[in-house]
Image: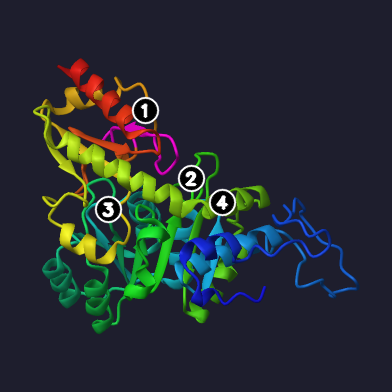
């Protein structure tokens, strides 16, 4: 395709990058290649480099190209899950004796992977408040780190880290920075432009967007690191199937529209809940009361995401009752789908961090605000709070 994607806007890149019409039939949507292997024209004579789908698949290639274009990165590699993406990125670039500086508010699965798999392998792990610049600076003065791991907004406390400032600080110490951009999506935030060395996604969330596919991705600009990640991706085989890639390609095409609606709905929900007596605190970076609001407003564009966390004044029992009383919000793990979800992180997505410095408050509820009518969503939350009373 002759389009110069560096000169187009995100919505255009999302629909056209990697989406060349089929050269044989002219089909506007690229074919779904449900094949495990490919005919060779002679021994070792591959057609366009395709030999086996664990290694390469045209549908996955389309998704990789599309995601890289949207993110503004040179390379994207798709994986079978977000944790598979994290695992391969770290295993392909770390060695025993290296250290990782992790935020004290991250997805429980990330902490579990690092603490239960990488630490026994010989990787050092330290935990600080990554949103606290001084705390990060002090940690870097005290030890050498291969990576700083950033989630912003973080999961589930929605803390905000200044990516640009943290990247500059890290690079002065010879440390790389990885940003898990799942909550913001490439619509709202571009960490590579702000100095990050790599970006990871659970594409299950906003990129897939319909709660019907599990996937992950790594996006970066460094060719050497890309080759290291691609080698282990192929060697270990943690790749998505062609249909998974096709679903995520479809999701990317409507990502901007959905994320902006998620964000608008979430802001309205956050503002409504912030004024209610049953609510102790609302955590949402779009609120001016949020301590990271100014940073988020500077580095996020077009909204503040679709996740709102709420602490109930009635404590754990009130939180559990609230989570079990909604009718439109579905009690379920995950986030980023078109439908609204509600969960109790301490007992669900973050149960693995219980008893650690990452432990989540018992009265915390995480809302993944969907794209339904916002008045209906607010009414549902209100009736659930009435039941709590």
* Circle number at residue 154: 3
Q: Give the range drawn in magenta.
A: 333-348
Answer yes or no: is residue 353 visible.
no
Q: Mark 1 points at which residue?
A: 331
> Which mark lies nearer to you, 3 or 2?
2
Considering only order in the chain, which callout, 2 or 4, is on the residue closer to the N terminus? Answer: 2
Left or right of 279: which side holds 240?
right
Answer yes or no: is residue 228 visible.
yes
Residue 139, quarter of the rendered image: bottom left
Q: Name the residue under label 2.
A: 209
| Quadrant into which the N terminus falls | bottom right
| Quadrant into which the C terminus falls | top left
Callout 4 secondary element: helix
Q: Mark 1 and mark 2: span between their CA atoms?
A: 17 Å
> Which mark lies nearer to you, 4 or 3?
4
* Circle number at residue 248: 4
What residue is shown at x 53% (from left), y 61% (from top)?
Answer: 14
Above or below, comparing residue 384 to residue 154 in the picture: above
The picture places residue 284, in percent across and down from the top left corner, at 21, 47
């Amino acid at each position: 395709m002759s389009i110069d994607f560096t000169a187009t806007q995100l919505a255009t890149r999302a629909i056209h990058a990697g989406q060349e019409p089929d050269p044989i039939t002219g089909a506007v949507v690229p074919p779904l290649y449900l094949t495990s292997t490919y005919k060779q024209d002679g021994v070792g004579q591959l057609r366009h480099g395709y030999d086996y789908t664990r290694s390469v698949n045209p549908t996955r290639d389309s998704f990789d190209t599309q995601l890289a274009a949207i993110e503004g990165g040179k390379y994207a590699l798709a994986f079978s899950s977000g944790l598979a993406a994290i695992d391969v990125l770290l295993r392909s670039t770390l060695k025993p004796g290296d250290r990782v500086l992790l935020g004290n508010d991250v997805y429980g699965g990330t902490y579990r992977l690092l603490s239960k798999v990488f630490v026994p392998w010989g990787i050092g792990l330290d935990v600080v408040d990554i949103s606290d610049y001084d705390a990060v600076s002090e940690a870097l003065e005290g030890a050498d780190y291969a990576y700083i791991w950033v989630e912003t907004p973080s999961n589930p406390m929605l803390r905000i880290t200044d990516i640009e400032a943290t990247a500059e600080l890290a690079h002065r110490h010879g440390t790389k920075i990885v940003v898990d951009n799942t909550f913001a999506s490439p619509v709202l935030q571009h960490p590579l432009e702000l100095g990050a060395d790599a970006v990871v996604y659970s594409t299950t969330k906003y990129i897939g967007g319909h709660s019907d596919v599990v996937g992950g991705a790594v996006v970066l600009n460094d060719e050497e690191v890309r080759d290291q990640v691609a080698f282990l991706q192929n060697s270990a085989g943690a790749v998505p199937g062609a249909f998974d890639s096709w679903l995520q390609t479809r999701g990317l095409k409507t990502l901007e529209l959905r994320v902006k609606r998620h964000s608008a709905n979430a802001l309205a929900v956050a503002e409504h809940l912030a004024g209610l007596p049953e609510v102790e605190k609302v955590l949402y970076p779009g609120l001016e009361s949020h301590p990271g609001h100014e940073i988020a407003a500077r580095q996020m564009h077009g909204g503040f995401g679709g996740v709102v966390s709420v602490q109930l004044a009635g404590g754990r029992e009130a939180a559990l009752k609230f989570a079990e009383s909604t009718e439109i919000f579905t009690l379920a793990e995950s986030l980023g789908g078109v439908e609204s979800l509600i969960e109790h992180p301490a007992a669900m997505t973050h149960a693995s961090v219980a008893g650690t410095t990452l432990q989540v408050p018992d009265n915390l509820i995480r809302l993944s605000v969907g794209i339904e009518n916002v008045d209906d969503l607010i009414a549902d939350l209100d009736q659930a709070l009435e039941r709590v009373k």
